[in-house]
Amino acid sequence: MSELKYRRVLLKLSGEALMGAQGYGIDVPTLQAIARECAEVKALGAELALVIGGGNIFRGLKGAAAGMDRTTADQMGMLATVMNALAMQDALEAHGVPTRVMSALEMRNVAEMYIRRRAARHLEKGRVVIFAAGTGNPYFTTDTAAALRALEIKADVVMKATKVDGVYDKDPKKHADAVRFDKLTYTDALNLDLGVMDATSISLCRENALPILVFDMTVPGNIVKAVCGTVTSTVVDR
C-alpha cells in the first residue's frame, strides 16, 4: 500500500475538469473516473475535501464581461458550483464513499450550511466534504474559496488539479521550450504572474504558510500519487 505524504487534503478541481471532451456541462465517465480516484485516496486513509469550480456551467466573470451585473453573475456561478458538487457527491457515493455537501449559500434541501467545526467533524468521521458556492460572496473565485476552506479545516496542502504537470514559465502547449518549475516561492508565483491560482488565494496561502501543489489530473492515478507525494508537480511554498 502506498504511504501518504498528506493526511488532510483540499483538492481544488475546475468545473472544466468535469467536461471531459465535451464543450459544456458534465461528462459522466469523466466524473466517475475522478470519483474512483478520490475513493482510492480515501481507502489509503487520507481525509479529503473538495472545492469544484462552476466554469463548465456558468462563469461569473464571463457574464459580467458580457454586461451582467457582477454580483448577479457571481451568484449564478456559485449556484453552478452547487450543481457540480451534487454530481460529485452522487458519483462518490456510487463508489461507496460517504460524503457531505456543505454550501456557503443556504439551500437546506440539497446541502448543509457550511459550519467549520461540523466540516472538521465530517472529515474525522471519514466523509469526503464537498464545499460548494465558493465563499458565498461575489468577487471571490473558487481558488480563494479553496485556500480559505483549506485553512479553516487545517488541511496539510491545497492541491490544484490542472491539465498540465505543474507550473511553467510559459504555456507548454504553445511553447516547446517551456520550463517547468519543481518548486516556487509564493512571492515568485505572484511576481511572475504564472497563473498558479489567483493573487488573493496565493496571498492567503503565503500569509498562513499553506503549501500549494499543482499537478496534472488528466493522467489516471495522479490524484493518488499527489496525495502520496510521488506525482510530477510544482510545489508553491516558502
Image (spheres, rainbow, N blue to C red):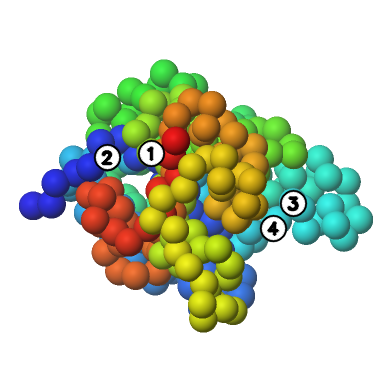
Q: Do the residues labelled 4 and 1 touch (CB within 8 Å)?
A: no
Mark 1 / mark 3, whichever is N-terminal = 3
Can you say whether 124 is above or below 55 in the image?
A: above
Q: Name the residue under label 2.
A: 6
Q: Nearer the viewer, residue 108 or 27?
A: 27
CA gap between label 3 and label 4 equals 6 Å
Q: Mark 4 points at which residue?
A: 58
- Asked which secondary structure carries label 1, the reply is strand
Residue 113 visible? The answer is no
Type of amino acid under label 4: Phe
Q: Nearer the viewer, mark 4 or mark 1?
A: 1
**Any mark on residue 157, and which?**
1
Type of amino acid under label 1: Val
Type of amino acid under label 3: Gly
Q: Which of marks 2 and 4 is in front?
A: 2
**Would you call the spot at circle 3 few (<14 residues within 10 Å), some (14-19), or many (20 or more)?**
many
Q: Which of 82 and 68 is in front in this view?
A: 68
CA gap between label 1 and label 3 equals 27 Å
